[in-house]
Image (spheres, coloured by chain):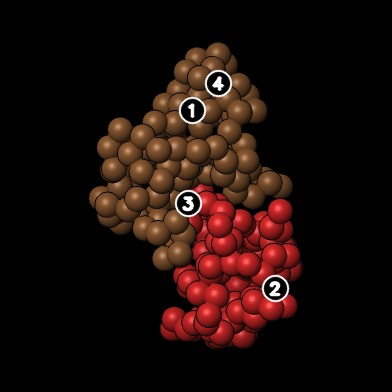
């Protein structure tokens, strides 16, 4: 069974700092990997979707990379802001499985 | 989220009563999913649908049933609610079984007392 791990579980940084969130998965037979943001008591907002054939995707201050062979993805956030404070979840769509396998998330706090 | 609506947003019910949660989409996506989110367990798939009247079980389907009579609506029913089903329930949609990514609803917070 696919297992997705996110490290660290929580991260606190001062405003303006660049940071990296890590995601690893055990089975490399995936269609894609998706990064989500979840604010407390809210739903999941999709940030970036990387197809298995891609190496990275960028949206504004966010950059996500994917190394399928090693089972790793990173989410890079540049010039962090207090509004970036949230829980970040990565999830993989596995080939042949109608399911999205989630990590348990990284809770980010950006201190003004 | 645009294109996907869950109702109700919050519900408190008593143990042993049936409960139905509704997910409505306007994206005409073929695939719809129900997940539950619990502390320490993350998000887990309950049931999913790959077309009208076509559904299948996920990893935590016991005690739940689903129905999809129209492309746009996917209903989740708790046959006889238990306290262990207190959770936040999310609906998601996808166009090609996840190949194009997933879009999630805002969630339903269900409390069983």
Colour red belongs to chain:
A
Q: Earlier in the sequence, mark 1 or mark 4?
A: 1
Neighbours of disc 1 within 10 Å: few (<14), some (14-19), many (20+):
some
Residue shown at the point (47%, 83%) measured from the top left: A58
Q: Is residue B8 visible?
A: no
Q: Chain of mark 1?
A: B
Towards the viewer: B19 or A11: B19
Point out residue B86 in the picture as x, y percentages from the top left corner: 58, 31
Q: Specify the label residue A28 is tagged with.
A: none
Q: Position of residue A105 (x, y in %)?
A: 65, 60
Q: Dot 2 corresponds to which residue? A: A71
Q: Nearer the viewer, mark 4 or mark 3?
A: 4
Q: Residues within 10 Å of mark 2 (few under 14, many from 20)?
A: some
| Residue carrying label 4 | B81
x and y percent of residue B45 in the render?
Answer: 56, 44
What percent of the width, then of the height, locates residue A77? 56, 81
Q: Chain of mark 2?
A: A
Quarter of the image that includes the C terminus of chain B: top right
Q: State how far apart marks 4 and 2 are (Cα).
A: 39 Å
Depth check: give the residue in front, A44 or A49. Answer: A49
Q: Which type of secondary structure does the marked residue at label 4 adopt? A: loop
Which residue is pictured at 42% across the width and 26% down the height? Answer: B20
Labels 1 and 3 positioned on one and the same chain: no
Side of A7 relative to B74 (left or right) = right
Q: Which residue is mark 3?
A: A42
């Amino acid at each position: 069974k696919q297992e997705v791990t996110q490290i660290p579980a929580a991260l606190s940084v001062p405003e303006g700092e660049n940071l990296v969130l890590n995601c690893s998965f055990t089975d490399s037979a995936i269609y894609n990997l998706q990064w989500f943001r979840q604010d407390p008591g809210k739903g999941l907002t999709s940030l970036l979707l990387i197809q298995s054939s891609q190496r990275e995707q960028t949206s504004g201050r966010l950059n996500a990379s994917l190394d399928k062979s090693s089972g790793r993805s990173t989410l890079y956030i540049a010039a962090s802001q207090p509004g970036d404070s949230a829980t970040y979840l990565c999830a993989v769509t596995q080939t042949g499985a109608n399911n999205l396998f989630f990590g348990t998330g990284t809770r980010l706090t950006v201190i003004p | 989220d645009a294109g996907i609506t869950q109702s109700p947003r919050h519900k408190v019910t008593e143990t042993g009563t049936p409960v139905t949660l509704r997910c409505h989409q306007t994206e005409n996506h073929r695939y719809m999913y129900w997940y539950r989110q619990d502390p320490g367990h993350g998000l887990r798939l309950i049931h999913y649908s790959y077309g009208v009247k076509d559904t299948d079980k996920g990893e935590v389907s016991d005690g739940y049933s689903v129905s999809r009579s129209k492309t746009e609506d996917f209903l989740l029913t708790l046959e006889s609610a238990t306290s262990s089903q207190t959770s936040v329930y999310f609906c998601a949609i996808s166009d090609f079984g996840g190949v194009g990514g997933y879009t999630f609803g805002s969630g339903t917070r269900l409390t069983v007392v």
